[in-house]
Every structure is written in C-alpha cells, then in structure tokens.
Image (cartoon, rainbow, N blue to C red):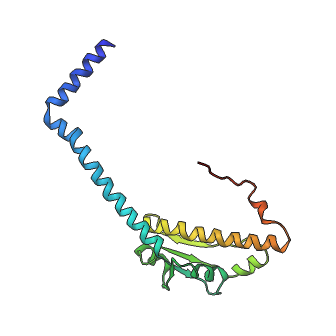
Amino acid sequence: MKIIGIVFKKEILDIYRDKKTFIVGILLPLILFPIIFGFMGKGMGNDKETVTKSTTIAIVDQYNSKLKAFLESKDNIKVIDVDDIEKAVDKGKIFVAVTIPKGFDDAIKNEKSANLEIYYDSSSSKSSMALNIVSSYVKEYSKLIVTERLNARNIDTSILSPIKAFSKK
C-alpha cells in the first residue's frame, strides 16, 4: 500500500509540473463544460417553452371526429393544413401529425378500441415534446370516454383509482 501511495504522489507531482497537461486535462474542462452545458440547457429550455405555448400539428380527419374537435379546443394546440404530413414533419413545419381513420367515432360509440397514427420526427426534440403533449391529450380524451362508458352503466369511476397517495411535509 505504501508503494501505491508513493507512485500516486509522483504521478500527481508530474501532472502539476507539466503545465500543458494541467491546463488541457484539468483547467480547460473545468471552464468549458459548464459553459457548454449551460448553452445546451438554455437551448432545450427555449424549445420546451416554444412547444408548450404553441404546439403546431396537422390533423388528417376526413370524417370530423370528436377527437379532432377535442384537440382543436386546446389552447396550446395550433392545427394547420398541410399536403404531405411526413414532409411537413421532417422539415419542421409542424411538430406532429395525427391521422384519424375512417370509423374512429363509430368504434368509440360501439365501445370498441380505435387506432390513431401519430407521425413525429424522432431526431427533433421539439417534435418529441409535441408528441408527449398530444399523447397526453389523447389519454385525457380516452379517460373521458371511459368515464362516459362507466357512467352509462352506473359504475362509480373511483374504481379506476384504487390508491390515492398524498404528500406531507
């Protein structure tokens, strides 16, 4: 153990004697890393704020479903028309595109499952954030449907949340 301590001290002294190694290996990273990560964090924060305030999406729905109306009613969702949704997502004109298939409302009305297609750009942080926002609205809409179905059967909706956790200080 004594030999390891002697070698360690010698190596540390060699690092401090060699100014170039000290500057490049220790001092430069201590200065540059906080600056780099600061800029990255600020940029991501700006992206998040932009997407949260105004999420630009396209909805392909030839049958005017209730889901389309639900999404359009949200304050931070801006729906625009585009010709080619995949190109528009790839170019960043829109963050997300939602395709609602024929028979969507009929499936919901008949108490069946319905599928949605959501296009997004996995390489874009804005598109990924918008996907999360749109997905949360789709889940909210789905919960509304479940609540309506349970109420139609006179079933208490609290059975869906058997555990309620509360935080205390």
Question: Residue drawn 64% across and 68% down?
Answer: 139
Looking at the picture, does residue 64 appear above or below residue 98? below
**Drawn side of residue 59 relative to residue 8, left or right:** right
Q: Viewer-proximal residue, 155 or 129?
A: 155
The number of numbered badges drawn on the structure is 0
Question: Residue drawn 46% across and 77% down?
Answer: 94
Q: Viewer-proximal residue, 140 or 92?
A: 140
Location of residue 146 in the rendering, given as x and y in whole percent from the top left corner: 75, 70
Most extreme residue toward the top, as rendered?
A: 2
Question: Residue drawn 56% across and 78% down?
Answer: 74
**Drawn side of residue 52 relative to residue 138, left or right:** left
Location of residue 24 in the rendering, given as x and y in whole percent from the top left corner: 20, 41
Question: Residue drawn 25% across and 16% down?
Answer: 6
Location of residue 26 in the rendering, given as x and y in whole percent from the top left corner: 23, 39
Looking at the picture, does residue 122 appear above or below residue 69? above
Most extreme residue toward the front, as rendered?
A: 169
Q: Quarter-wise, where is residue 104 in the image?
A: bottom right
Location of residue 42 in the rendering, given as x and y in whole percent from the top left corner: 35, 61
Looking at the picture, does residue 42 appear above or below residue 130? above
Q: Looking at the figure, which quarter contains the N terminus? A: top left
Q: Viewer-proximal residue, 17 or 110?
A: 17
**Drawn side of residue 60 relative to residue 107, left or right:** left
